[in-house]
């Protein structure tokens, strides 16, 4: 009774078809009113934003229905898996704010049990050792339009099968010599049901079980049994497993075990991004990026280094929801989520990315003023800070034009602008390099009466520039990122081409001589700021120098899209 009340209280979060299933199960008293999910990564790469969606979903449902969520490493393939990946996965899940408590499991924990189940299937004539080669198995399997043919080894006796399977395990055979197959139906319209392989020989040592095994279970066989052993109630996976569900159910029925329900949802696809560990590994391996945590990578580690917050990823995953059909989500939505979150929490600071020297001729030479600046106009509780102002400043090169186009409200000869938090200045003289004609420095005058924005005569200026004091500012390196791919859908835009053809070769620009406010000198890695007019930035953890990675620009294309949708609906 109590549980149902608590479910009602949770109705505030958007409903979806998975929640409908769970609530129906709860109302029918199924699984003793338990909700128990799991997140089952294969440790063969770092987690990406698609996994984040699955993590938020599985851990989120567990917490919403006061249930549990396990973390289970699906380590059934010893050839691709590495300990480095296991550690990174744990770190990423914790960083997202989820906790598996004492429920960290490995598929390899169950190898003995799975072997027992396989023997049980053999004994009930539901599995047999097949000695066809891999190629032959494929050939016998048939196609979508043609039924398969029975393997000549299908009628081996229970005794012979038990003996051969035991010898497979003992290491008496070479890889590919024999496999264990389920005996189902070679004419099934569902290819997954045509006597799928459930165990194969791999002479490879495993990161946890060492050399104990040389036969390893296949995913389809292992996964449902792992779920059942852990008494998972709702086994949530992506759509490509829909056709495997009959097999999932078949194993559990044959073995008469606790039966979790598999539920499929559409995997996340993101524009201008690839989300497949195999492809991401290629980017790492061939040096297109600097590593799995390169801030351009769609991995959780990459987003973290880029400056994304866990909250922004939760928000994103909530907004995209869960669907039954595949779609491509606009990466602008993800950027919108992090922008919204950082807008609330990031301290505003001034940083000049491409410095141009500016001298205020009528400002006293050794004078330094401490100017008070608001840290975040969105959150006054974040307080204020003091920024030094002096005679020599840096402004942004692009904030000055010798020959301004129309409607250019920034600085040009004879023009007056406001320096953020400080005074009005007017450009009096331009010093150029005699040979190159490049602008070297600007000489200006300031209006001492204009501190903080107003003037005695009430005159207005249109441009406001950010700046730093030359003598006080700190040098920093800044990485500006662009999308890693030039095509909206680099995987599917042309089936015959390699996704790597669509890599954007200008996806990062590094500026090495940026000047930032002195207060940033000791900013700790991972801390995030808004550089006025430039976007949000996060401190990278590089040794000996101050490096900022741009998380996202201030311009919000998603907000525009949302607005135009609203306007269209309104009209
Ligand atoms: P990839 O294709 O990127 O290698 P995978 O599905 O093989 O992904 P697993 O480690 O097996 O990776 O996945 C762990 C869990 O994450 C699975 O339950 C899987 O369904 C889910 N998952 C993987 N990719 C996505 C995605 N793009 N969107 C949503 N969930 C995903
Ligand atoms: Mg997988």
Image: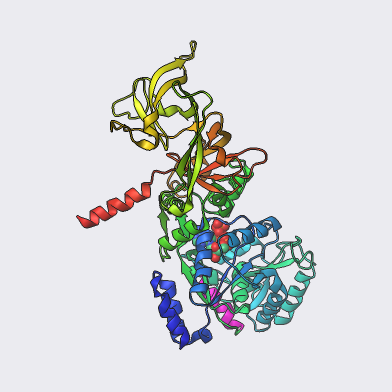
Query: Is residue 462 visible in the rendered structure shown here?
Result: yes
Magenta run includes residue 151: no
Q: Main secondary structure of the magenta part?
A: helix
The residue drawn where x is 66% and y is 75% is 128
Q: Nearer the viewer, residue 154 or 504?
A: 504
Q: With 102 as the anchor, is 499 left or right in this view? A: left
Q: Nearer the viewer, residue 423 or 38?
A: 423
Q: With 490 as the anchor, is 183 left or right in this view? A: right
Q: Position of residue 60 (x, y in %)?
A: 50, 69
Q: Position of residue 95 (x, y in %)?
A: 58, 59
Range of residues picked out in magenta: 244-255
Q: Is residue 259 above or below residue 431?
A: below
Residue at the far top: name it.
434
Residue 424 lies in quadrant: top left
Q: Is residue 511 above or below residue 130?
A: above
Q: Position of residue 363 (x, y in %)?
A: 46, 24
The residue drawn where x is 54% and y is 32% is 514
Q: Position of residue 283 (x, y in %)?
A: 58, 45
Q: Give the mark count.
A: 0
């Amino acid at each position: 009774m109590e549980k149902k009340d608590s479910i009602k209280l949770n109705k505030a979060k958007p409903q979806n078809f998975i929640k409908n299933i769970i609530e129906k199960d709860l109302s029918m008293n199924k699984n003793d009113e338990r909700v128990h999910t799991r997140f089952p990564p294969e440790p063969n790469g770092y987690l990406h934003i698609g996994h984040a969606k699955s993590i938020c979903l599985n851990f989120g449902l567990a917490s919403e229905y006061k249930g549990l969520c396990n973390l289970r490493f699906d380590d059934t393939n010893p050839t691709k898996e590495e300990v480095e990946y296991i550690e990174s996965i744990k770190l990423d899940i914790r960083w997202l704010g989820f906790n598996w408590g004492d429920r960290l499991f490995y598929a390899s924990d169950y190898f003995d049990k799975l072997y027992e189940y396989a023997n049980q299937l053999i004994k009930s004539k539901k599995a047999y050792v097949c000695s066809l080669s891999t190629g032959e198995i494929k050939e016998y399997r048939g196609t979508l339009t043609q039924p398969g043919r029975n393997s000549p080894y299908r009628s081996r006796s229970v005794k012979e099968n038990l003996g051969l399977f035991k010898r497979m395990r003992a290491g008496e055979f070479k890889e590919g010599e024999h496999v264990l197959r389920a005996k189902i139906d070679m004419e099934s319209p569902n290819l997954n049901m045509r006597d799928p392989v459930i165990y194969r020989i791999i002479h490879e040592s495993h990161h946890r079980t060492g050399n104990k095994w040389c036969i390893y279970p296949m995913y389809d066989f292992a996964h449902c049994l792992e779920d059942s052993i852990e008494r998972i109630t709702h086994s949530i996976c992506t759509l490509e497993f829909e056709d495997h569900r009959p097999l999932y159910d078949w194993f559990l029925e044959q073995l008469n075990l606790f039966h979790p329900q598999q539920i499929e949802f559409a995997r996340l696809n993101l524009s201008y991004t690839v989300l497949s560990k195999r492809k991401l590994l290629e980017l790492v391996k061939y040096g297109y990026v600097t590593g799995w945590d390169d801030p351009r990578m769609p991995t959780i580690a990459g987003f973290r280094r880029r400056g994304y917050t866990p909250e922004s990823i939760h928000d994103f995953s909530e907004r995209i929801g869960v669907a039954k059909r595949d779609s491509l989500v606009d990466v602008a939505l993800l950027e919108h989520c992090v922008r919204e979150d950082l807008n609330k929490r990031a301290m505003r600071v001034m940083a000049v990315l491409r410095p141009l020297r500016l001298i205020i001729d009528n400002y006293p030479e050794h004078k330094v003023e401490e100017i008070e600046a608001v840290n975040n106009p969105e959150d006054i509780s974040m307080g204020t800070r003091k920024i030094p102002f002096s005679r020599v400043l840096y402004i942004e090169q692009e904030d000055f034009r010798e020959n301004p186009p129309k409607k250019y409200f920034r600085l040009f000869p004879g023009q007056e602008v406001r320096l953020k938090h400080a005074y009005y200045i007017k450009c009096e003289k331009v010093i150029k390099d005699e040979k190159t004609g490049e602008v070297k420095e600007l000489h200006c005058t300031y209006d001492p009466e204009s501190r903080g924005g107003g003037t005695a005569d009430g005159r207005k200026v249109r441009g406001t520039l950010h700046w730093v004091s030359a003598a006080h500012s700190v040098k920093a390196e800044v990485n500006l990122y662009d999308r890693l791919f030039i095509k909206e859908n680099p995987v599917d835009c042309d089936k015959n081409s390699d996704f790597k053809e669509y890599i954007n070769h200008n996806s990062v620009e590094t500026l090495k001589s940026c000047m930032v406010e002195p207060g940033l000198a000791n900013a700790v890695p991972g801390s995030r700021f808004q550089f006025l007019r430039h976007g949000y930035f996060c401190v990278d953890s590089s040794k000996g120098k101050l490096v900022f990675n741009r998380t996202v620009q201030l311009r919000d294309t998603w907000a525009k899209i949302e607005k135009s949708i609203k306007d269209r609906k309104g009209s």
